[in-house]
Image (tube, rainbow, N blue to C red):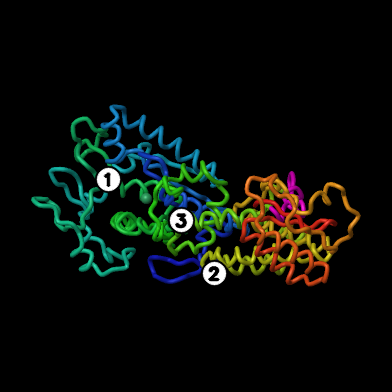
Protein backbone atom coordinates (compact mmCIF):
# COMPACT_ATOMS: atom_id res chain seq x y z
CA UNK A 1 0.00 0.00 0.00
CA UNK A 2 1.46 3.31 -1.04
CA UNK A 3 1.87 5.99 1.61
CA UNK A 4 1.80 9.64 0.54
CA UNK A 5 2.15 12.95 2.31
CA UNK A 6 -1.26 14.46 2.94
CA UNK A 7 -1.18 18.26 3.08
CA UNK A 8 -4.44 18.20 5.07
CA UNK A 9 -2.82 16.35 7.99
CA UNK A 10 0.81 17.29 7.41
CA UNK A 11 1.70 13.58 7.63
CA UNK A 12 2.69 10.72 5.36
CA UNK A 13 -0.31 8.39 5.42
CA UNK A 14 -1.47 5.24 3.61
CA UNK A 15 -3.70 5.91 0.62
CA UNK A 16 -6.75 3.77 1.35
CA UNK A 17 -8.90 3.54 -1.79
CA UNK A 18 -12.52 4.52 -1.38
CA UNK A 19 -13.42 1.79 -3.87
CA UNK A 20 -11.55 -1.51 -3.76
CA UNK A 21 -8.74 -1.83 -6.32
CA UNK A 22 -9.33 1.58 -7.81
CA UNK A 23 -8.03 5.08 -7.14
CA UNK A 24 -9.91 8.25 -8.04
CA UNK A 25 -7.51 11.12 -8.67
CA UNK A 26 -8.18 14.71 -9.66
CA UNK A 27 -5.24 16.90 -10.67
CA UNK A 28 -5.71 20.60 -11.35
CA UNK A 29 -4.85 21.22 -14.98
CA UNK A 30 -3.64 24.30 -16.81
CA UNK A 31 -5.24 27.65 -17.48
CA UNK A 32 -4.72 27.80 -21.23
CA UNK A 33 -3.50 31.33 -21.92
CA UNK A 34 0.21 30.75 -22.67
CA UNK A 35 2.89 28.18 -23.42
CA UNK A 36 3.44 25.60 -20.68
CA UNK A 37 6.51 26.21 -18.52
CA UNK A 38 8.87 23.95 -16.61
CA UNK A 39 6.66 23.98 -13.51
CA UNK A 40 3.74 22.66 -15.56
CA UNK A 41 5.98 19.94 -16.92
CA UNK A 42 6.96 18.94 -13.42
CA UNK A 43 3.48 18.60 -11.95
CA UNK A 44 2.29 16.73 -15.02
CA UNK A 45 5.23 14.31 -14.75
CA UNK A 46 4.90 13.86 -10.97
CA UNK A 47 1.26 12.87 -11.25
CA UNK A 48 1.93 10.80 -14.37
CA UNK A 49 4.52 8.81 -12.41
CA UNK A 50 2.14 8.47 -9.46
CA UNK A 51 -0.61 7.24 -11.76
CA UNK A 52 1.70 4.80 -13.54
CA UNK A 53 3.00 3.46 -10.26
CA UNK A 54 -0.50 2.96 -8.84
CA UNK A 55 -1.36 1.05 -12.01
CA UNK A 56 1.89 -0.89 -11.73
CA UNK A 57 0.73 -1.82 -8.22
CA UNK A 58 -2.38 -3.41 -9.68
CA UNK A 59 -4.86 -0.57 -9.11
CA UNK A 60 -7.17 0.98 -11.67
CA UNK A 61 -6.76 4.75 -11.73
CA UNK A 62 -9.59 7.09 -12.67
CA UNK A 63 -7.54 10.16 -13.51
CA UNK A 64 -9.31 13.46 -14.14
CA UNK A 65 -7.53 16.70 -14.97
CA UNK A 66 -9.31 19.86 -16.05
CA UNK A 67 -8.69 22.58 -18.60
CA UNK A 68 -9.46 26.09 -17.36
CA UNK A 69 -10.71 27.84 -20.48
CA UNK A 70 -12.33 30.91 -18.93
CA UNK A 71 -10.20 33.17 -16.78
CA UNK A 72 -8.97 36.77 -16.38
CA UNK A 73 -5.68 35.94 -18.10
CA UNK A 74 -7.37 34.36 -21.12
CA UNK A 75 -9.64 37.38 -21.44
CA UNK A 76 -6.70 39.80 -21.14
CA UNK A 77 -4.68 37.93 -23.77
CA UNK A 78 -7.60 37.78 -26.19
CA UNK A 79 -8.14 41.52 -25.77
CA UNK A 80 -4.47 42.32 -26.35
CA UNK A 81 -4.34 40.20 -29.53
CA UNK A 82 -7.77 41.25 -30.79
CA UNK A 83 -9.01 37.65 -31.01
CA UNK A 84 -11.66 35.74 -29.07
CA UNK A 85 -11.18 33.94 -25.76
CA UNK A 86 -12.14 30.73 -27.57
CA UNK A 87 -9.24 31.26 -30.01
CA UNK A 88 -6.75 31.77 -27.18
CA UNK A 89 -7.98 28.78 -25.20
CA UNK A 90 -7.96 26.50 -28.26
CA UNK A 91 -4.44 27.60 -29.28
CA UNK A 92 -2.89 27.02 -25.88
CA UNK A 93 -4.80 23.88 -25.12
CA UNK A 94 -3.19 22.45 -28.24
CA UNK A 95 0.25 23.59 -26.99
CA UNK A 96 -0.51 21.87 -23.71
CA UNK A 97 -1.38 18.49 -25.19
CA UNK A 98 1.54 18.68 -27.61
CA UNK A 99 3.92 19.21 -24.69
CA UNK A 100 2.27 16.44 -22.66
CA UNK A 101 2.54 14.00 -25.55
CA UNK A 102 6.20 14.93 -26.03
CA UNK A 103 6.84 14.28 -22.33
CA UNK A 104 5.10 10.92 -22.53
CA UNK A 105 2.45 11.95 -20.01
CA UNK A 106 -0.56 9.64 -20.20
CA UNK A 107 -3.76 11.45 -21.06
CA UNK A 108 -6.26 11.64 -18.20
CA UNK A 109 -9.38 9.52 -18.55
CA UNK A 110 -11.31 12.78 -18.58
CA UNK A 111 -10.22 16.36 -19.19
CA UNK A 112 -13.30 18.49 -18.47
CA UNK A 113 -13.46 22.10 -19.64
CA UNK A 114 -14.66 24.78 -17.25
CA UNK A 115 -16.96 26.27 -19.90
CA UNK A 116 -18.82 22.94 -20.16
CA UNK A 117 -19.66 23.08 -16.48
CA UNK A 118 -20.94 26.62 -16.00
CA UNK A 119 -24.55 25.54 -15.43
CA UNK A 120 -23.47 23.18 -12.66
CA UNK A 121 -21.35 25.95 -11.17
CA UNK A 122 -24.33 28.32 -11.17
CA UNK A 123 -26.29 25.66 -9.31
CA UNK A 124 -23.50 25.24 -6.75
CA UNK A 125 -23.22 29.00 -6.18
CA UNK A 126 -27.00 29.23 -5.75
CA UNK A 127 -26.75 26.46 -3.16
CA UNK A 128 -24.11 28.35 -1.21
CA UNK A 129 -26.19 31.53 -1.33
CA UNK A 130 -29.24 29.61 -0.12
CA UNK A 131 -27.37 28.12 2.82
CA UNK A 132 -26.05 31.53 3.83
CA UNK A 133 -22.37 30.69 3.35
CA UNK A 134 -22.14 32.99 0.31
CA UNK A 135 -23.27 36.58 -0.19
CA UNK A 136 -23.72 39.04 -3.06
CA UNK A 137 -21.84 42.28 -3.64
CA UNK A 138 -22.08 44.78 -6.46
CA UNK A 139 -19.37 42.92 -8.44
CA UNK A 140 -20.26 39.30 -7.74
CA UNK A 141 -20.92 36.51 -5.29
CA UNK A 142 -18.43 35.67 -2.54
CA UNK A 143 -17.92 32.80 -0.17
CA UNK A 144 -17.69 33.84 3.44
CA UNK A 145 -14.73 31.89 4.79
CA UNK A 146 -15.90 32.55 8.36
CA UNK A 147 -18.90 30.35 7.57
CA UNK A 148 -16.58 27.40 6.89
CA UNK A 149 -15.31 25.49 9.87
CA UNK A 150 -11.57 25.00 9.92
CA UNK A 151 -10.86 27.32 6.99
CA UNK A 152 -7.11 27.49 6.35
CA UNK A 153 -6.43 23.75 6.79
CA UNK A 154 -4.44 23.31 3.57
CA UNK A 155 -2.54 26.54 4.14
CA UNK A 156 -1.14 24.93 7.30
CA UNK A 157 -1.25 28.32 8.98
CA UNK A 158 -3.55 29.77 11.65
CA UNK A 159 -6.51 31.76 10.38
CA UNK A 160 -5.23 34.94 12.05
CA UNK A 161 -1.95 34.72 10.16
CA UNK A 162 -3.81 34.23 6.90
CA UNK A 163 -6.12 37.12 7.66
CA UNK A 164 -3.19 39.39 8.46
CA UNK A 165 -1.53 38.43 5.16
CA UNK A 166 -4.60 38.86 2.98
CA UNK A 167 -4.77 41.87 0.76
CA UNK A 168 -7.41 44.33 1.91
CA UNK A 169 -9.05 45.99 -1.06
CA UNK A 170 -9.87 49.65 -0.47
CA UNK A 171 -13.59 50.31 -0.61
CA UNK A 172 -14.34 46.61 -1.11
CA UNK A 173 -17.59 45.09 0.01
CA UNK A 174 -16.09 41.82 1.16
CA UNK A 175 -16.88 40.86 4.72
CA UNK A 176 -13.44 39.39 5.26
CA UNK A 177 -10.30 40.01 3.17
CA UNK A 178 -10.03 36.23 2.60
CA UNK A 179 -13.51 35.86 1.13
CA UNK A 180 -13.23 34.89 -2.51
CA UNK A 181 -15.30 35.29 -5.65
CA UNK A 182 -17.57 32.44 -6.68
CA UNK A 183 -19.13 34.49 -9.46
CA UNK A 184 -18.01 37.67 -11.23
CA UNK A 185 -20.65 39.96 -12.61
CA UNK A 186 -20.57 40.72 -16.33
CA UNK A 187 -18.23 43.44 -17.54
CA UNK A 188 -18.51 44.88 -21.04
CA UNK A 189 -16.83 42.73 -23.66
CA UNK A 190 -16.33 39.70 -21.42
CA UNK A 191 -17.85 36.24 -21.94
CA UNK A 192 -20.99 35.85 -19.83
CA UNK A 193 -23.44 33.18 -18.77
CA UNK A 194 -26.93 33.63 -17.32
CA UNK A 195 -27.52 33.11 -13.60
CA UNK A 196 -30.37 33.85 -11.19
CA UNK A 197 -28.00 36.14 -9.25
CA UNK A 198 -27.02 38.13 -12.34
CA UNK A 199 -25.21 37.22 -15.55
CA UNK A 200 -21.45 36.84 -15.37
CA UNK A 201 -18.77 34.17 -15.21
CA UNK A 202 -17.51 31.77 -12.58
CA UNK A 203 -14.53 32.43 -10.31
CA UNK A 204 -11.62 30.06 -10.80
CA UNK A 205 -11.98 28.10 -7.55
CA UNK A 206 -15.46 26.80 -8.29
CA UNK A 207 -14.88 24.73 -11.41
CA UNK A 208 -12.69 22.06 -9.79
CA UNK A 209 -15.19 21.44 -7.00
CA UNK A 210 -18.05 20.92 -9.41
CA UNK A 211 -16.10 18.86 -11.95
CA UNK A 212 -14.30 16.62 -9.46
CA UNK A 213 -17.50 15.82 -7.56
CA UNK A 214 -19.37 15.20 -10.79
CA UNK A 215 -16.78 12.88 -12.31
CA UNK A 216 -15.31 11.21 -9.22
CA UNK A 217 -18.02 11.54 -6.57
CA UNK A 218 -17.80 12.56 -2.93
CA UNK A 219 -14.78 11.63 -0.82
CA UNK A 220 -12.60 10.72 -3.79
CA UNK A 221 -9.09 9.49 -3.10
CA UNK A 222 -6.47 11.98 -4.26
CA UNK A 223 -6.52 15.64 -5.20
CA UNK A 224 -3.24 16.86 -6.57
CA UNK A 225 -1.40 19.84 -7.93
CA UNK A 226 1.59 22.09 -7.42
CA UNK A 227 2.28 23.36 -3.89
CA UNK A 228 1.40 26.89 -5.03
CA UNK A 229 -2.19 25.62 -5.44
CA UNK A 230 -2.53 24.37 -1.86
CA UNK A 231 -3.49 27.85 -0.74
CA UNK A 232 -5.65 29.56 -1.70
CA UNK A 233 -6.93 27.47 -4.65
CA UNK A 234 -7.29 24.06 -3.02
CA UNK A 235 -8.31 25.45 0.33
CA UNK A 236 -10.99 27.48 -1.43
CA UNK A 237 -12.17 24.35 -3.24
CA UNK A 238 -12.33 22.51 0.06
CA UNK A 239 -14.22 25.41 1.66
CA UNK A 240 -16.89 25.35 -1.06
CA UNK A 241 -17.35 21.59 -0.83
CA UNK A 242 -17.67 21.99 2.92
CA UNK A 243 -20.23 24.80 2.46
CA UNK A 244 -22.16 22.49 0.13
CA UNK A 245 -21.98 19.65 2.64
CA UNK A 246 -20.17 17.45 0.13
CA UNK A 247 -16.81 16.00 1.18
CA UNK A 248 -14.08 16.53 -1.42
CA UNK A 249 -10.77 14.63 -1.55
CA UNK A 250 -9.40 12.62 1.35
CA UNK A 251 -5.73 12.87 0.39
CA UNK A 252 -4.19 16.16 -0.79
CA UNK A 253 -0.91 15.71 -2.64
CA UNK A 254 1.29 18.63 -3.67
CA UNK A 255 4.56 18.77 -5.55
CA UNK A 256 7.33 21.30 -4.95
CA UNK A 257 8.57 24.25 -6.97
CA UNK A 258 10.93 24.32 -9.91
CA UNK A 259 13.93 26.49 -9.06
CA UNK A 260 16.86 27.66 -11.10
CA UNK A 261 19.41 27.85 -8.27
CA UNK A 262 22.03 30.52 -8.58
CA UNK A 263 21.92 30.49 -12.35
CA UNK A 264 20.19 33.15 -14.30
CA UNK A 265 17.60 31.73 -16.66
CA UNK A 266 18.51 33.12 -20.03
CA UNK A 267 18.54 31.70 -23.51
CA UNK A 268 21.88 33.33 -24.15
CA UNK A 269 23.34 31.18 -21.38
CA UNK A 270 21.92 28.04 -22.93
CA UNK A 271 19.49 27.86 -20.05
CA UNK A 272 15.89 26.77 -20.40
CA UNK A 273 13.17 29.32 -20.09
CA UNK A 274 10.19 27.27 -21.18
CA UNK A 275 9.13 23.68 -21.52
CA UNK A 276 8.96 24.12 -25.24
CA UNK A 277 12.53 25.39 -25.26
CA UNK A 278 13.71 22.43 -23.18
CA UNK A 279 11.87 19.91 -25.34
CA UNK A 280 13.29 21.41 -28.50
CA UNK A 281 16.85 21.12 -27.19
CA UNK A 282 16.86 17.81 -25.39
CA UNK A 283 15.45 14.31 -25.29
CA UNK A 284 12.10 14.78 -23.48
CA UNK A 285 12.87 11.66 -21.47
CA UNK A 286 15.73 13.48 -19.77
CA UNK A 287 13.33 15.99 -18.18
CA UNK A 288 11.31 13.08 -16.82
CA UNK A 289 14.52 11.63 -15.42
CA UNK A 290 15.46 15.00 -13.93
CA UNK A 291 12.06 15.24 -12.26
CA UNK A 292 12.41 11.69 -10.92
CA UNK A 293 15.79 12.47 -9.42
CA UNK A 294 14.22 14.92 -6.96
CA UNK A 295 11.67 13.89 -4.40
CA UNK A 296 8.37 15.31 -5.59
CA UNK A 297 7.93 17.48 -2.49
CA UNK A 298 11.40 18.99 -2.74
CA UNK A 299 12.31 21.91 -4.99
CA UNK A 300 13.56 20.81 -8.40
CA UNK A 301 16.61 22.64 -9.61
CA UNK A 302 16.68 23.02 -13.35
CA UNK A 303 20.06 24.27 -14.44
CA UNK A 304 22.41 23.54 -17.29
CA UNK A 305 24.29 21.22 -14.93
CA UNK A 306 21.31 19.20 -13.62
CA UNK A 307 19.87 18.91 -17.11
CA UNK A 308 23.17 17.65 -18.50
CA UNK A 309 23.49 15.18 -15.62
CA UNK A 310 20.03 13.83 -16.34
CA UNK A 311 20.83 13.47 -20.04
CA UNK A 312 23.98 11.55 -19.14
CA UNK A 313 22.07 9.28 -16.79
CA UNK A 314 19.57 8.63 -19.55
CA UNK A 315 22.48 7.76 -21.80
CA UNK A 316 23.56 5.11 -19.30
CA UNK A 317 20.11 3.53 -19.41
CA UNK A 318 20.06 3.53 -23.19
CA UNK A 319 23.59 2.11 -23.22
CA UNK A 320 22.41 -0.81 -21.10
CA UNK A 321 19.61 -1.31 -23.53
CA UNK A 322 22.07 -1.38 -26.44
CA UNK A 323 24.35 -3.84 -24.74
CA UNK A 324 21.69 -6.36 -23.75
CA UNK A 325 19.03 -5.59 -26.30
CA UNK A 326 16.75 -4.68 -23.41
CA UNK A 327 14.63 -2.35 -25.49
CA UNK A 328 13.88 -5.05 -28.01
CA UNK A 329 12.98 -7.88 -25.69
CA UNK A 330 9.61 -6.53 -24.71
CA UNK A 331 7.47 -6.56 -27.76
CA UNK A 332 3.82 -6.95 -28.59
CA UNK A 333 1.63 -8.03 -25.75
CA UNK A 334 4.49 -8.29 -23.28
CA UNK A 335 5.58 -4.72 -24.04
CA UNK A 336 2.09 -3.50 -23.37
CA UNK A 337 2.15 -5.07 -19.95
CA UNK A 338 5.52 -3.56 -19.07
CA UNK A 339 5.28 -1.19 -16.20
CA UNK A 340 1.59 -1.74 -15.75
CA UNK A 341 1.53 -5.28 -14.49
CA UNK A 342 3.75 -6.08 -11.59
CA UNK A 343 2.65 -9.72 -11.55
CA UNK A 344 3.85 -10.35 -15.06
CA UNK A 345 7.37 -9.51 -13.90
CA UNK A 346 7.45 -12.80 -11.97
CA UNK A 347 6.25 -14.81 -14.96
CA UNK A 348 9.00 -13.30 -17.07
CA UNK A 349 11.70 -14.34 -14.62
CA UNK A 350 12.81 -10.84 -13.70
CA UNK A 351 14.82 -10.10 -10.58
CA UNK A 352 12.23 -10.27 -7.81
CA UNK A 353 14.43 -8.69 -5.13
CA UNK A 354 15.12 -5.64 -7.29
CA UNK A 355 11.42 -5.20 -8.00
CA UNK A 356 10.49 -5.57 -4.32
CA UNK A 357 13.08 -3.00 -3.34
CA UNK A 358 11.84 -0.61 -6.03
CA UNK A 359 8.25 -0.97 -4.79
CA UNK A 360 9.13 -0.42 -1.15
CA UNK A 361 10.86 2.83 -2.09
CA UNK A 362 8.00 4.01 -4.28
CA UNK A 363 5.48 3.07 -1.58
CA UNK A 364 7.36 5.33 0.82
CA UNK A 365 5.85 8.66 -0.26
CA UNK A 366 6.84 8.10 -3.88
CA UNK A 367 10.57 8.18 -3.17
CA UNK A 368 11.63 8.26 -6.82
CA UNK A 369 15.26 9.33 -6.13
CA UNK A 370 15.77 6.19 -4.02
CA UNK A 371 13.83 4.00 -6.47
CA UNK A 372 15.89 5.34 -9.34
CA UNK A 373 19.13 4.79 -7.43
CA UNK A 374 17.99 1.17 -7.13
CA UNK A 375 17.42 0.97 -10.89
CA UNK A 376 20.93 2.29 -11.53
CA UNK A 377 22.30 -0.29 -9.11
CA UNK A 378 20.57 -2.95 -11.23
CA UNK A 379 22.17 -1.36 -14.30
CA UNK A 380 25.58 -1.57 -12.65
CA UNK A 381 25.07 -5.19 -11.69
CA UNK A 382 23.94 -6.04 -15.21
CA UNK A 383 27.20 -4.66 -16.60
CA UNK A 384 29.24 -6.48 -13.98
CA UNK A 385 27.51 -9.73 -14.89
CA UNK A 386 28.06 -9.03 -18.57
CA UNK A 387 31.73 -8.23 -17.99
CA UNK A 388 32.14 -11.56 -16.23
CA UNK A 389 30.59 -13.39 -19.11
CA UNK A 390 27.42 -14.19 -17.15
CA UNK A 391 25.23 -13.26 -20.07
CA UNK A 392 21.97 -14.73 -18.79
CA UNK A 393 22.23 -12.96 -15.45
CA UNK A 394 23.18 -9.75 -17.25
CA UNK A 395 20.12 -10.04 -19.46
CA UNK A 396 17.84 -10.78 -16.52
CA UNK A 397 19.05 -7.65 -14.75
CA UNK A 398 18.90 -5.52 -17.89
CA UNK A 399 15.34 -6.65 -18.54
CA UNK A 400 14.48 -5.89 -14.92
CA UNK A 401 15.90 -2.38 -15.27
CA UNK A 402 13.91 -1.90 -18.46
CA UNK A 403 10.74 -3.10 -16.75
CA UNK A 404 11.20 -0.73 -13.82
CA UNK A 405 11.96 2.17 -16.14
CA UNK A 406 8.69 1.41 -17.94
CA UNK A 407 6.91 1.64 -14.56
CA UNK A 408 8.27 5.18 -14.29
CA UNK A 409 7.24 6.02 -17.84
CA UNK A 410 10.78 5.88 -19.19
CA UNK A 411 11.16 3.90 -22.37
CA UNK A 412 14.70 2.88 -23.12
CA UNK A 413 15.97 3.38 -26.63
CA UNK A 414 18.76 1.38 -28.13
CA UNK A 415 19.28 3.69 -31.05
CA UNK A 416 20.53 6.79 -29.27
CA UNK A 417 24.12 7.77 -28.65
CA UNK A 418 27.06 9.01 -30.71
CA UNK A 419 29.21 7.02 -33.10
CA UNK A 420 31.75 4.62 -31.71
CA UNK A 421 35.10 6.29 -31.37
CA UNK A 422 38.13 4.34 -32.55
CA UNK A 423 40.65 4.26 -29.76
CA UNK A 424 42.76 1.42 -31.04
CA UNK A 425 43.88 2.51 -34.44
CA UNK A 426 41.91 0.06 -36.56
CA UNK A 427 42.24 -3.04 -34.42
CA UNK A 428 38.48 -3.01 -34.13
CA UNK A 429 37.93 -2.83 -37.87
CA UNK A 430 40.39 -5.64 -38.46
CA UNK A 431 38.43 -7.80 -36.10
CA UNK A 432 41.54 -8.74 -34.19
CA UNK A 433 41.31 -12.21 -32.78
CA UNK A 434 41.97 -10.93 -29.34
CA UNK A 435 39.93 -12.64 -26.67
CA UNK A 436 37.94 -11.04 -23.88
CA UNK A 437 40.07 -9.30 -21.36
CA UNK A 438 43.08 -8.68 -23.56
CA UNK A 439 44.47 -5.19 -23.38
CA UNK A 440 43.46 -3.59 -26.61
CA UNK A 441 43.97 0.11 -26.20
CA UNK A 442 46.72 2.05 -27.82
CA UNK A 443 47.27 5.47 -26.42
CA UNK A 444 47.31 8.45 -28.69
CA UNK A 445 45.69 6.84 -31.72
CA UNK A 446 43.68 8.91 -34.14
CA UNK A 447 40.36 9.83 -32.58
CA UNK A 448 39.29 12.79 -34.59
CA UNK A 449 36.52 11.08 -36.52
CA UNK A 450 34.06 12.30 -33.92
CA UNK A 451 33.58 16.04 -33.37
CA UNK A 452 35.07 16.19 -29.92
CA UNK A 453 37.08 13.04 -29.50
CA UNK A 454 38.21 11.61 -26.22
CA UNK A 455 41.01 13.52 -24.52
CA UNK A 456 44.09 11.97 -22.96
CA UNK A 457 42.32 11.52 -19.66
CA UNK A 458 39.48 9.55 -21.22
CA UNK A 459 41.88 7.39 -23.22
CA UNK A 460 43.78 6.70 -20.00
CA UNK A 461 40.56 5.55 -18.34
CA UNK A 462 39.80 3.25 -21.26
CA UNK A 463 43.28 1.77 -21.07
CA UNK A 464 43.10 1.34 -17.34
CA UNK A 465 39.73 -0.32 -17.70
CA UNK A 466 41.02 -2.82 -20.23
CA UNK A 467 43.84 -3.60 -17.85
CA UNK A 468 41.39 -4.09 -14.96
CA UNK A 469 39.33 -6.45 -17.09
CA UNK A 470 42.42 -8.37 -18.12
CA UNK A 471 43.17 -8.80 -14.42
CA UNK A 472 39.54 -9.78 -13.83
CA UNK A 473 39.19 -6.89 -11.37
CA UNK A 474 35.52 -6.40 -12.09
CA UNK A 475 34.76 -3.84 -9.41
CA UNK A 476 37.59 -1.64 -10.67
CA UNK A 477 36.40 -2.09 -14.26
CA UNK A 478 32.95 -1.13 -13.17
CA UNK A 479 34.11 1.96 -11.29
CA UNK A 480 35.96 3.04 -14.42
CA UNK A 481 32.81 2.54 -16.48
CA UNK A 482 31.09 4.92 -14.10
CA UNK A 483 33.90 7.45 -14.41
CA UNK A 484 33.64 7.31 -18.19
CA UNK A 485 29.88 7.69 -17.97
CA UNK A 486 30.27 10.78 -15.84
CA UNK A 487 32.66 12.15 -18.45
CA UNK A 488 29.90 11.61 -21.00
CA UNK A 489 31.06 8.36 -22.61
CA UNK A 490 29.10 5.18 -23.05
CA UNK A 491 31.15 2.04 -22.68
CA UNK A 492 30.74 -1.29 -24.40
CA UNK A 493 32.91 -4.34 -23.99
CA UNK A 494 33.97 -6.19 -27.07
CA UNK A 495 36.39 -9.03 -27.67
CA UNK A 496 38.82 -6.33 -28.79
CA UNK A 497 38.54 -4.43 -25.52
CA UNK A 498 36.61 -1.40 -24.35
CA UNK A 499 34.75 0.64 -26.94
CA UNK A 500 33.42 4.09 -26.16
CA UNK A 501 31.10 6.60 -27.72
CA UNK A 502 29.54 9.87 -26.72
CA UNK A 503 26.49 9.32 -24.56
ZN1 LIG B 1 -8.27 23.28 -9.42
Q: In the displayed structure, does residue 311 sit left or right of residue 434? A: left
Disc 2 under 8 Å from ligand 1? The reply is no
Q: Which residue is mark 3?
A: 302
Determine whether 253 is above or below 27 in the image.
below
Q: Which mark is residue 203?
A: 1
- The label nearer to you, 1 versus 2, is 2
Disc 1 under 8 Å from ligand 1? The reply is no
The N terminus: image quadrant: bottom right
Q: Residues within 10 Å of mark 3 (few under 14, many from 20)?
A: many
Helix or strand or loop: what does disc 3 sit on?
Answer: loop
N-term mark: 1 or 3:
1
- Chief SS of the magenta region: helix
N-term mark: 1 or 2:
1
Q: In the displayed structure, does residue 210 sit left or right of residue 307? A: left
Is residue 328 in the magenta section?
Answer: yes
Is residue 382 in the magenta section?
Answer: no
Q: CA distance from mark 2 to mark 3?
A: 25 Å
What is the residue that sits farthest to the right in this orientation?
433
* Front-most of residues 424 and 16: 424
Per the rendered image, the range of residues in magenta is 319-333
Q: Position of residue 389 (x, y in %)?
A: 84, 63
- Looking at the image, how many numbered discs can be counted on the residues? 3
Q: Which residue is mark 2?
A: 364
* Front-most of residues 24 and 106: 106
Q: Position of residue 360 (x, y in %)?
A: 60, 69
Q: CA distance from mark 1 to mark 2?
A: 37 Å
Amino acid sequence: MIRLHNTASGKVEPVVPRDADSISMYVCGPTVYGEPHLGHGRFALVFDVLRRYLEFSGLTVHHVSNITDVDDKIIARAASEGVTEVDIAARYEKSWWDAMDALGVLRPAEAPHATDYVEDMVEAVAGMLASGSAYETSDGVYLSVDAVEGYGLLARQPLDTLRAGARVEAGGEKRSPMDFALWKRAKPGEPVWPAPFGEGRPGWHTECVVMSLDLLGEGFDIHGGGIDLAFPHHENERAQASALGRPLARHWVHNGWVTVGGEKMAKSLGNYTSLDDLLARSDPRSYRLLVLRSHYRQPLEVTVRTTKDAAEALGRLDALSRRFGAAGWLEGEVRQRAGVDQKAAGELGLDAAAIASFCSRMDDDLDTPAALAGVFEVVRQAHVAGDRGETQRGEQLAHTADWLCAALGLRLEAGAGGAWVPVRGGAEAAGGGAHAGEVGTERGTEASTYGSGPDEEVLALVEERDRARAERDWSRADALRDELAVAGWTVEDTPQGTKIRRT
